[in-house]
């Protein structure tokens, strides 16, 4: 019987990092500790259009947030081709939402010392067309906040990997493809 | 024992009208969605699953909003039984609005050709004989800029539906294009 399960684990073909440690775990996710950059190669392929990246137990004492760049053949897409829309809810306020244009990375979540998590929905990163990302997250900054991001990347390039950046961070990420 | 989170559902058939087209099996690729151009994904809701996830990608074109109607026995549920709440984050402005008595509801957006938005749409209980709820989470690439335009929708009739019809809000050809995958969520 054909496997029709919703998600397919996209175990990286290789990873690289700067900082203390990073390794691929038995489930196909990547565990990392006190790294300043983490690259996952071979996680986006022509087999799937859309992907889910789950981040958990992520923590950082740095200001700012968990960011990413697309990557192809071992080189990051670091041009000013990303836009970011933030929707935030802090206490009784939803003000302070911003849009950033012509920036060099996408945002996925806001850092906090308390471990936090996010779901990142990636639409078409391995297709030769612009890419959209939606990240739904919880952060322990100010006890609990909602920081959600919609990101775009304008280049019509097919990417096979992703690099996470932003201060020094610890946690786990796992990339899944949506079966089609 | 590992239990899969969900299962890919292949429509029993895909019907088109008004110049729209569709292809594919597990992933349905569509073009030409307008006020008159539509596709219907037949046989996607059943008693096997209560809840479903629609993954909509590569959404682009001139069709404007991506709209849907529940469907059963070859007929769309087109009465004024849908309600929609939206939240829109665009630059520094966050706004909301609610529409009631609607004859369809919105689940996605396309602003222009080659803009490629994406949506995750959670559908709660469409095959149960009770009202249905939708929640659409978006990454809206609005003329090249990122925007959040999310929807929560309800449909008030206690009817068991088996299918979904998609169409666009714009009348201009070539309309909205994209892909859709339907997953039943394990229970």
Image: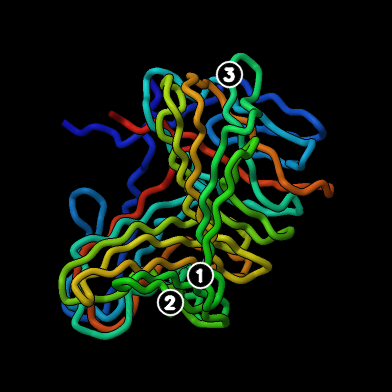
Q: Is residue B69 visible?
A: yes
The chain letter under disc 2 is A
Residue A71 drawn at (x, y percent): 46, 69
Q: Nearer the viewer's eye, disc 1 or disc 3?
A: 1
Q: Is residue A79 visible?
A: no
Left or right? Give the position of B90 relative to A68.
right
Marks 2 and 1 sit apart, C-alpha to C-alpha, by 7 Å
Closest to the observer: A141 or A172? A141
Closest to the observer: A159 or A139? A139
Would you name the residue on which mark 1 appears? B94
Determine whether A59 is above or below A44 in the image: below
**Same-chain check, marks 2 and 1:** no
Which image quarter holds the N terminus of chain B? Answer: top left
Q: Answer yes or no: do the residues labelled 2 and 1 have beta carbons within 8 Å? A: yes
Q: Residue at x 41, y 34 (%)?
A: B124
Residue A165 drawn at (x, y percent): 34, 77
Marks 2 and 3 sit apart, C-alpha to C-alpha, by 42 Å
Residue A52 drawn at (x, y percent): 39, 52
Q: Nearer the viewer's eye, disc 2 or disc 3?
A: 2
Closest to the observer: B18 or A121? B18
Regarding mark 2 in the picture, which secondary structure is present there?
A: loop
The chain letter under disc 1 is B
Q: Residues within 10 Å of mark 1 (few under 14, many from 20)?
A: some
**Same-chain check, marks 1 and 3:** yes
Would you name the residue on which mark 3 appears? B72
**Same-chain check, marks 2 and 3:** no
The chain letter under disc 3 is B
Would you name the residue on which mark 2 appears? A95
Closest to the observer: A169 or A110? A110
């Amino acid at each position: 019987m054909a496997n029709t399960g919703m998600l397919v684990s996209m175990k990286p073909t290789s990873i690289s990092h700067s900082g203390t440690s990073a390794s691929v775990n038995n489930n196909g996710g990547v565990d990392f500790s006190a790294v300043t950059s983490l690259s996952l190669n071979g996680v986006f392929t022509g087999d799937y259009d859309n992907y889910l990246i789950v981040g958990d137990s992520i923590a950082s004492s740095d200001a700012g947030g968990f960011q990413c760049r697309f990557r192809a053949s071992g080189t990051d897409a670091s041009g000013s081709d990303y836009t970011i829309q933030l929707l935030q809810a802090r206490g009784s306020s939803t003000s302070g939402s911003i849009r950033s244009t012509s920036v060099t990375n996408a945002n996925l979540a806001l850092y906090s010392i308390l471990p936090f998590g996010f779901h990142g929905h990636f639409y078409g990163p391995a297709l030769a067309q612009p890419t959209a990302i939606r990240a739904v997250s919880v952060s322990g900054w100010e006890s609990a906040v909602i920081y959600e991001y919609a990101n775009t990347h304008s280049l019509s390039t097919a990417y096979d990997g992703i690099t996470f950046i932003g201060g020094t961070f610890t946690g786990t990420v796992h990339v899944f493809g949506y079966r089609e | 024992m590992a239990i899969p989170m969900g299962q890919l559902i292949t429509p029993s058939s895909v019907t088109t009208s008004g110049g729209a087209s569709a292809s594919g099996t597990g992933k349905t690729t569509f073009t030409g969605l307008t006020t008159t151009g539509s596709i219907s994904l037949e046989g996607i809701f059943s008693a096997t699953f209560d809840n479903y996830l629609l993954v909509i990608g590569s959404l682009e074109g001139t069709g404007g909003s991506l709209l849907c109607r529940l469907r059963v026995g070859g007929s769309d549920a087109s009465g004024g039984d849908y309600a929609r709440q939206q939240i829109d984050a665009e630059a520094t402005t966050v706004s909301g609005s609610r529409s009631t008595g609607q004859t369809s509801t919105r689940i996605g957006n396309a602003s222009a050709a080659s803009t490629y938005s994406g949506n995750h749409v959670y559908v709660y209980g469409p095959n149960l004989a009770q009202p249905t709820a939708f929640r659409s989470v978006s990454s809206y690439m609005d003329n090249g800029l990122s925007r959040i335009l999310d929807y929560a929708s309800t449909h008030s009739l206690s009817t068991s539906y088996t299918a979904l019809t998609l169409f666009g809000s714009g009348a201009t050809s070539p309309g909205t294009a994209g892909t859709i995958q339907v997953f039943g969520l394990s229970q």
